[in-house]
Image (cartoon, helix red, strand yellow):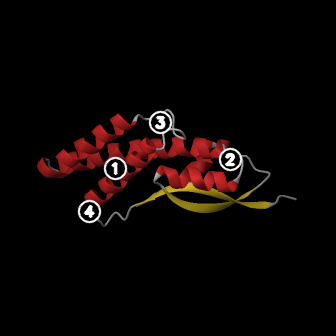
């Protein structure tokens, strides 16, 4: 019989009703945290420079562009943050125990939550996408 186990997971909680600036601030904080913890996050994918540039493009679009351009830039920024979250998740997956996993997530700047998974199950990437969500 399968046993149930809590699994720490990284998330970025952003209320879509809030300003895009809130998303940008949270994303920049994550970049800062990942950059300040380079011993844990040796080669972030995508690079922190690429993410910062994507966020800058979103900021510029918020100031000077029409709504369709802003939505396009927001989608691009959200995608790179999701990619970084998946990179953090890959490091968490390789950690030995729950306290280490929690430490890694906290060091990344992403919010921490837990999912209960069956210990005998191996989750594929698509299943993890459902467990590790960005709340909009």
- Assign a secondary structure to mark 3: loop
Q: Nearer the viewer, mark 2 or mark 3?
A: 3
Which SS class for mark 4?
Answer: loop
Q: Which one is in front, 48 or 71?
A: 48
Residue occupying image coordinates x 11% and y 48%: 64
Category of crowding for the residue at label 4, using alpha-carbon neighbours closer than 10 angstroms: few (below 14), some (14–19), many (at least 20): few
Q: Residue 95, which numbered label?
A: none
Looking at the rendered structure, the secondary structure element under dot 1 is helix
**Residue 66 placement (x, y as % from top left):** 14, 49
Along the viewing direction, whichever of 92 and 18 lies nearer the viewer: 92
Kindly identify which residue carries mark 2.
123
Q: Which residue is mark 3?
A: 44
Q: What is the C-alpha distance between the residues marked 2 and 4?
A: 34 Å
- Residue 134 seen by the camera: no
Mark 2 or mark 1: whose residue is earlier in sequence: 1
Q: Is residue 128 left or right of residue 70?
A: right
Q: Which residue occupies 50% across, 56% down?
A: 11
Mark 3 Cα shell of 10 Å, populated few (<14), some (14-19), many (≥20): some
Where is mark 1, residue-wise? 28
Q: Which residue is mark 4?
A: 19
């Amino acid at each position: 019989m399968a046993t149930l186990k809590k699994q720490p997971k990284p998330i970025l909680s952003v209320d879509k009703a809030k300003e895009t600036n809130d998303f940008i601030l949270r994303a920049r904080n994550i970049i800062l945290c990942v950059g300040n913890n380079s011993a844990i996050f040796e080669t972030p994918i995508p690079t922190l420079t690429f993410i910062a540039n994507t966020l800058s493009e979103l900021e510029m679009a918020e100031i000077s562009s029409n709504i369709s351009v802003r939505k396009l830039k927001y989608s691009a920024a959200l995608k790179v943050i999701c990619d970084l979250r998946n990179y953090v998740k890959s490091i968490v997956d390789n950690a030995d125990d729950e306290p280490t996993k929690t430490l890694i997530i906290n060091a990344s700047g992403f919010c921490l939550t837990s999912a209960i998974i069956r210990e005998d199950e191996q989750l594929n990437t698509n299943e993890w996408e459902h467990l590790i969500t960005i709340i909009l």
